[in-house]
Image (spheres, rainbow, N blue to C red):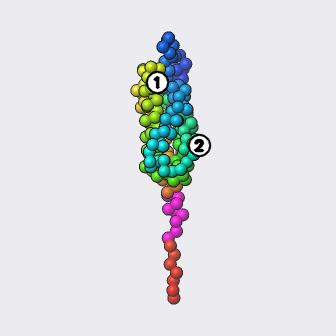
Amino acid sequence: MSESKSSTAAARKTSRAGSIESVADIIERELRPLIANWLDRVEGEPDLARIPLNYEERTGHLPDLLHDVIARLRLDAGAKAPISQAAADHGDLRRKQGYTVAMAVEESRLLQVSIFSMLHKNVKNLEFSTLLPDVVTIADEVDAQLKEQMLRFMAADAAAQKNETPPTHARID
C-alpha cells in the first residue's frame, strides 16, 4: 500500500530553527497572505483592475481554488485528480463580471507567481525532497483549473451564439 503525502507531512522534522513543512502545509498556513499578495498583483494590472469588483467579488473564489491545489498536493502518487468544480464556477462568474479570456489567463498566471513567491519566502521551512514535484503539481493544477474556466467561457459563448437568431427582414409584397 502506498504512503500518502499527508502521512509524510504528518511526520515533520522539527529543529531549533523551525519545522520543515510540506508545500501543501505552507500554502494552507499562508493562505491569507497569499491571497493578499495575489490581490496586490491583480490590482497592479490595469486590464484586471478596470473591472470594478469589491474584495469579496475579486478574491472570494481563491480559498476554494487554493484548497483544490492543497488537496491535489496531498493526493497519493498516481491518484487521478478530480476536476475542480470551484474553477468551473469561477469561470462562469468571471465571464458574467466582464472578464475576457486574456484577463482570466492573466489572473491565473498571477496566482502561480503568488504561490511560487510565497514558497520562496518560506524556503527555510520547505521539505526539499518533494519541492520540484510539488511545483510541477501546482502548475498542473492551476493550469487544469484555467482549462476548466475556459471550457465554461466557451460553453457560454456557444450558448449565446445558439440563442442568437438571424435578423428577420420584413417582406414587402
- In this rendering, the answer to whether 139 lies above or below 167 is above
- In this rendering, the answer to whether 156 lies above or below 81 is below
Q: Type of residue at label 1? A: Asn
Residue at numbered disc 2: 56
Magenta: main secondary structure equals: helix
Magenta stretch bounds: 158-166
Pinpoint residue 28: horizontal percent, then vertical percent. 54, 28
Mark nearer the N terminus (2 vs 1):
2
Asked whether the viewer can see residue 47, the reply is yes
Residue at x-position 43% and y-position 31%: 116
Residue at x-position 55% and y-position 48%: 53
Binning the other alpha carbons within 10 Å of mark 2 as few (below 14), some (14 to 19) or many (20 upward) gives few
Q: Type of residue at label 2? A: Glu
The image's mark for residue 1 is: none
Pinpoint residue 46: horizontal percent, then vertical percent. 44, 48
The single residue placed furthest to the top in the displayed view is: 16
Real-space CA distance between mark 2 and mark 1, rounded to the nearest whole angstrom: 27 Å
Dot 2 falls on a residue whose secondary structure is helix
Residue at numbered disc 1: 122
